[in-house]
Amino acid sequence: MKVGELCRLRWQDADVASRQLTIRYALTRSRCVVIPEALLPVLALGVRQCPADDHIFRGTRPDKPLCERSVERIVRRLAMDAGLLKDVCCMSLRHSHAVTRLTVRVGWPVSARSRSH
């Protein structure tokens, strides 16, 4: 998932019952990804308590999502706090996830669809 896609997620995009997250990447295009088991309780709580059209990751203004630049800053700060010596950004996390999926033999077509390539 790209950073911009993550920032634009709304509570209505999370279907906890079917474990699907709808990612909208164009005005009329979207794709679905499986919600990891560990995230289900958090998303279920949010779906129950938050308005469906609210962003999951809200910015400083309630009507605006968290911006991509803020996400990059958060990831870099967390990497530094964790003591990682190598520069970490959202793109490196996305690529690491893709490589991990390929090494566990998820397969290129399935892995490519989940990354929107």
Image (cartoon, helix red, strand yellow):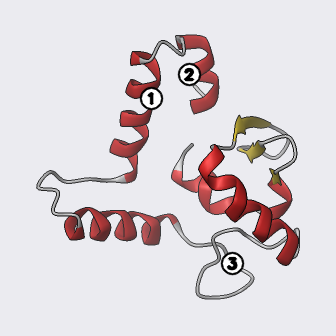
Is mark 2 in CB contact (under 8 Å) with mark 3? no
x, y percentage for residue 80? Answer: 20, 67
Secondary element at image label 2: helix
x, y percentage for residue 76? Answer: 29, 64
Badge 1 is on which residue? 98
Up-down relation of residue 98 to residue 27 (above or below) = above
Amino acid type assigned to the residue bearing label 3 in the image: Lys
Amino acid type assigned to the residue bearing label 2 in the image: Ser
Numbered badge on residue 111: 2
Q: Is residue 50 visible?
A: no
Is mark 1 in CB contact (under 8 Å) with mark 2? yes
Which label sits in the foreground, 2 or 3? Answer: 2
Q: In this image, 50 relative to 112: left or right?
A: right
Q: Is residue 108 visible?
A: yes
x, y percentage for residue 95? Answer: 38, 34
Disc 2/disc 3 C-alpha distance (Å): 31 Å
Secondary element at image label 3: loop
Sequence-wise first label, 1 or 2: 1
Badge 3 is on which residue? 64
Q: Residues within 10 Å of mark 1 (few under 14, many from 20)?
A: some
Disc 1/disc 2 C-alpha distance (Å): 7 Å
In the picture, residue 103 is in which quadrant? Answer: top left
Q: What residue lies at 40% left-to-right and 27% top-to-bottom? A: 100
The C terminus - image quarter: top right
Q: In this image, 103 relative to 81: left or right?
A: right
Give the number of callouts. Answer: 3
x, y percentage for residue 106? Answer: 54, 16
Up-down relation of residue 108 to residue 60 (above or below) = above
Q: What residue lies at 54% left-to-right and 11% top-to-bottom? A: 107
